[in-house]
Image (cartoon, grey):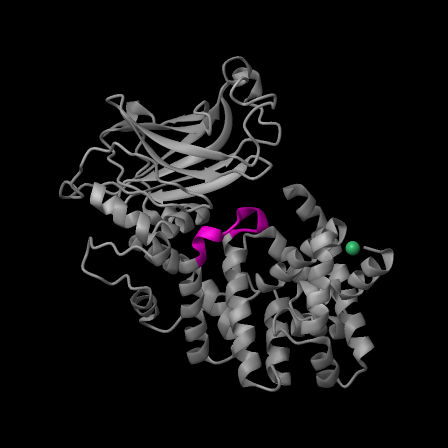
Amino acid sequence: MTDRDCEWLRAVADELALGVLPGQERAEAIAHLDRCPACRERVEHLTFVGDGLLSLLPGSEPPAGFETRVTDRLGLNRPARRWRPRAGVAVAAAVATALGFGFGGWAVGTAIEGASAPPSRSSQPPGSAHGLLAASLLAPGHRPVGRIFAYTGHPGWVYMSVHLGRDGSGSDSRAGDASEAAGSRDGYPEAGKVGCRLERTDGTSVHLGEFSLDDAGRGYWGAPTRVDPATVSGARLLAADGSVLATARFDAGHNQ
Amino acid sequence: MRRLGLPLGRLSDEALLAGMATGAPETALAFVRRFQRMVFGIAVAVVDDPQLAEDIAQQTFERAWRHAQVYDSRRGSVKTWLGTITHNLAIDAVRARKATPVSPEDLDALLGIVTRTPEQWALADEAASRIRAAVAGLPRQQARAVVMAGIYGMTARQISEFEGIPLGTAKTRIRTAMGKLRTVLEPERADHD
Ligand SMILES: [Zn+2]
């Protein structure tokens, strides 16, 4: 790129960020952003201003019946407990249903691996409350690197957000046992795949799926899965080589 | 096991979206409940037609439901993401239906809404208060230009025609206004990064 390109970009950056730059110029501007991080950052900041403008608009109550019409449109108003997954996770969910256990990806590159979940009936004890379990994901050395949520309702799901940090920082504690598998790099394999395993109180565990972390070690992922509040104990975040990147423990003391 | 006993309504925006991404209907419903006022508010402000606004709001949730997997928290909050979806749909609808995106009266009314600070909104969001004050502090012509572009999606050319000014002047007004608003929000932005 040339300075002249950047100069031109600066002249149209505001209109681009507000989404009002006409077609041809817009295409040129985007092509420039693809190769110019400095201009990209500038436009990102301006986009933030545009978002701020939208946040000034007051909320407004939609007409009566709106909620129902939306859920109809999404195909959600079906007899209770009949879960129709969206197309995106349909295949994974079909497998899941067959196994009586849910798998499905919410992130790029989710894969289903041989799961050994026990067959489970998807009924819940009458009157049992749906609850949300939450725990911190802790890297070796108890450094918090994310959160995990497990929803015990129907259908249940697990969601985690992870931020290992650029240097992996689990590296200190992992150096000994995992350095061989991880090659010469420190810490987790950057931008690599990680796996999530849910653990039960009886010592068994089940692989829920995999997702990718970006090169800053960040990622977030969720999957539909049955979460039995009586037996789930925690979760593990695993590197591709099987080494443990982080663990989460739902506090056993508060079991109901 | 720690049972937080949190009802879905108390989940974080991100966790709620995640639940929706996994295909959980009751989570999707909770998501709609949480954001419908905001979504409808943006839609109706832009299109000024309740029926069209409802259709846009419905499309917004449909799109969010379909694209929940690709939401990227690094690029902004769930609220912002959803607001942008709504806004884009609303702008498209306006562009498809009307030659002029806004009438002078509507513009004045909206500017009033955006710049006034009625207590009933009691916006907890400090960034919103600051940008509101900043828009209110802009020279009127610049405030009009930035609202026309940023909220009604009007191009610089449309603004120049609407205001009866040269194209270059319209562009300058947008740029100057954005520059000022950016300065006001910059410290906030830096804090977050
Ligand atoms: Zn550049």
| Secondary structure mostly seen in the magenta stretch | helix
Task: Say whether residue A71 is left or right of residue B158.
Answer: left
* Magenta span includes A193: no
* Magenta span includes B76: yes
Which one is in front, B80 or B19?
Answer: B19
The residue sitting at the top extreme is A176
Q: Estimate the x, y position of residue A15 in percent, counting from the top left.
A: 71, 67
Q: Give the range drawn in magenta.
A: B67-77
Residue A216 higher or lower than B146, as above or below: above
Residue A221 higher or lower than B165, as above or below: above
Quadrant for residue A120, please give it.
Answer: top left
Which one is in front, A10 or B41?
Answer: A10
- Which residue appears at 53% of the width and 47% of the height? B73
Task: Say whether residue A32 is left or right of residue A248.
Answer: right
User: Which of the four quarters of the rendered structure image does ligand 1 lie in?
Assistant: bottom right
Quadrant for residue B59, please give it.
Answer: bottom left
- Which residue appears at 71% of the width and 56% of the height? A33
Number of marks present in the image shown: 0
Residue A177 higher or lower than A113, as above or below: above
Residue B143 appearing in the image:
no
Q: Estimate the x, y position of residue A42 in percent, counting from the top left.
A: 73, 54
Residue B62 appearing in the image:
yes
Q: Which of the image's four quarters has the C terminus of chain B?
A: top right
Q: Estimate the x, y position of residue A144 in percent, counting from the top left.
A: 50, 27
